[in-house]
Amino acid sequence: MAACGGKKTDKPPVPVPTAPLPTAGLAGQKVCVMPLTLAAAEDTLHWEGLIADRRTTLDKSDSIIGSLLTGRSPEVTWVLPAELRRAARRAAGIAPEPDQMGTSFLRADQLIDVPDPLRYQLRTLAGLAGARFALVPAGLVFRKAPVRSDTGGAPHAAPVPMVAVAELSVVLVDTRLGQVQWRTTARGEGQDPWTALTRAVKSLTPGLP
């Protein structure tokens, strides 16, 4: 009984560190980058005006993700969402529409086997692009960051201005096996959505500025 009566703590759980992209095993290969389909922000951020237009928010997020992947991991041939959409249009009736796929389902931490019909859809789309693997941004959430004080020893110094944390869930799927091979949550802080997202994506390739 005594062992079960430990003290409770109000401290939030420490996030799991972001795992770097496994680009060494993907070098020289084509990898599909699926479009983001889920983006949300906590109400306390009051970012309704910044991300209210869902299509604009998703497109801008895709652009940031794609440009940073190609610039920071050139050893991989990334097939970006725009190219996937063109491939799907050329194979209308066979290929799924990339923006209508249930990829946000893959953000579930314990998921390993990709269920159908998503499994079949990913395999079909990747096959059209000549790829085996698909990198899936499965969800983007903006959360209010805790207020921190950087007083430098001064007891009455003003707190550091509040920023938001972008949490980008990312998974790598082997579309032939229909399995998640790697997953992580990339995090980055910023005063606006796009700065926070940029820093989150940069955290996937540590060691670069």
Image: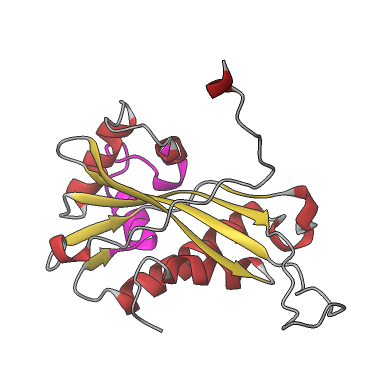
Q: Quadrant of residue 8?
A: top right
Q: Residue at x 33, y 78 (%)?
A: 207
Image position, residue 150 (x, y; %): 72, 77
Q: Nearer the viewer, residue 139 or 5?
A: 5
Q: Is residue 66 above or below residue 151?
A: above
Q: Residue at x 17, y 47 (%)?
A: 127
Q: Which residues are magenta?
A: 79-103
Q: Residue at x 32, y 27 (%)?
A: 117
Q: Is residue 76 above or below residue 137?
A: below
Image position, residue 189 (x, y; %): 60, 68
Image position, residue 52 (x, y; %): 72, 55
Q: Nearer the viewer, residue 151 or 95?
A: 151
Image position, residue 84 (x, y; %): 32, 55
Q: Nearer the viewer, residue 145 or 10?
A: 10
Q: Is residue 91 above or below residue 167?
A: above
Position of 101 with respect to 124 (left or right) is right
- Quadrant containing the C terminus is bottom left
Position of 91 with respect to 27 (left or right) is right
Q: Quadrant of residue 156?
A: bottom right
Q: Residue at x 27, y 73 (%)?
A: 73
Q: Is residue 30 above or below residue 132?
A: below
Residue 101 visible in image: no
Q: Quadrant of residue 107?
A: top left
Q: Is residue 137 magenta?
A: no
Colour theme = secondary structure
> Farthest residue in the front direction?
2
- Quadrant containing the N terminus is top right
